[in-house]
Amino acid sequence: QMTQSPSSLSASVGDRVTITCRASQSIGGFLNWYQQKPGKAPKLLIHGVSSLQSGVPSRFSGSGSGTDFTLSISSLQPEDFATYYCQQSYSIPLTFGGGTKVQI
Amino acid sequence: EVQLVESGGVLIQPGGSLRLSCAASGFTFGSYWMHWVRQVPGKGLEWVSRINSDGSPTSYAESVTGRFTISRDNAKNTLYLQMNSLRAEDTAVYYCARSPQGFSGYVDNWGQGTLVTVSS
């Protein structure tokens, strides 16, 4: 089970934002992050805790290990307002966190 | 360019059956693991199933095990999800998604989704 916090947050352009994801058991480095905008399919941001997917801006970063993980956005941009999901790929069934909605 | 196009979503009565399709293009379909992920409108993401590049093995979420079957036709570049004994709680947008080559636990390309509504 993957638990994200907070479930929503309000921030301004230029803010640093941090989203936390906790696994119910150790998942090593098998943690991925997705971004989803309203009406659109999710988009892969980060895989393997900290590897930035091709084309994703460097203001996004990931860290953590074991059970506790973090997605950070160093300087929030207007296009970053979206919902973010973590996902473990350590074991079947693959599971997602409940999501964190980043709002203005 | 990778393209995944789902089809088959409809309004269907509880207990009914439905087959979703996902037409793939822009990559060598038969070399990649494929997945179905669903999302109740306004809610979070739920992984449903995955299938190996050559059709076996397959895996399922507990919520659909015994009712849903994933399959693929590599000659037709198409992924399928056979959904039987549908329930109201299966109502969702169903996304077809691809894993990166050599990986099976996460996805790097998604379709636009197809809406399945289970209601009487």
Image: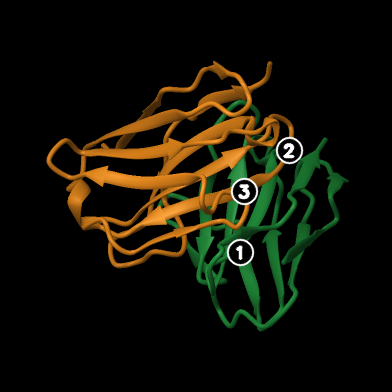
When the figure is inspected, residue B87 is found, relative to residue B9, above or below; the finding is below
Query: Which amino acid type is shown beneath numbered disc 3?
Result: Glu
Where in the figure is residue A104, as x and y percent of width and height? 83, 35
Badge 3 crowding class, 10 Å Cα cut-off, few under 14, some 14 to 19, many 20 or more, is many
Q: Chain B, which colour?
A: orange
| Disc 3 target residue | B46
The subunit letter for the residue under badge 3 reads B
Where in the figure is residue A100, as x and y percent of width and height? 77, 49
Q: Residue furthest left?
A: B75
Say which of marks 2 and 1 sits in front.
2
| Disc 2 target residue | B43
Between residue A28 and residue B55, name the one nearer to us. Answer: B55
Question: From this viewpoint, is residue A53 visible?
Answer: yes
**Distance (Cα) linking label 2 and label 1:** 25 Å
Q: Which chain is displayed in green in the rendered image?
A: A
Badge 2 crowding class, 10 Å Cα cut-off, few under 14, some 14 to 19, many 20 or more, is few
Q: Quadrant of residue A103?
A: top right
Question: From this viewpoint, is residue A57 visible?
Answer: no
| Disc 1 target residue | A61
Is residue B100 left or right of A52 when viewed as pictured? left
Residue shown at the point (77%, 55%) measured from the top left: A17
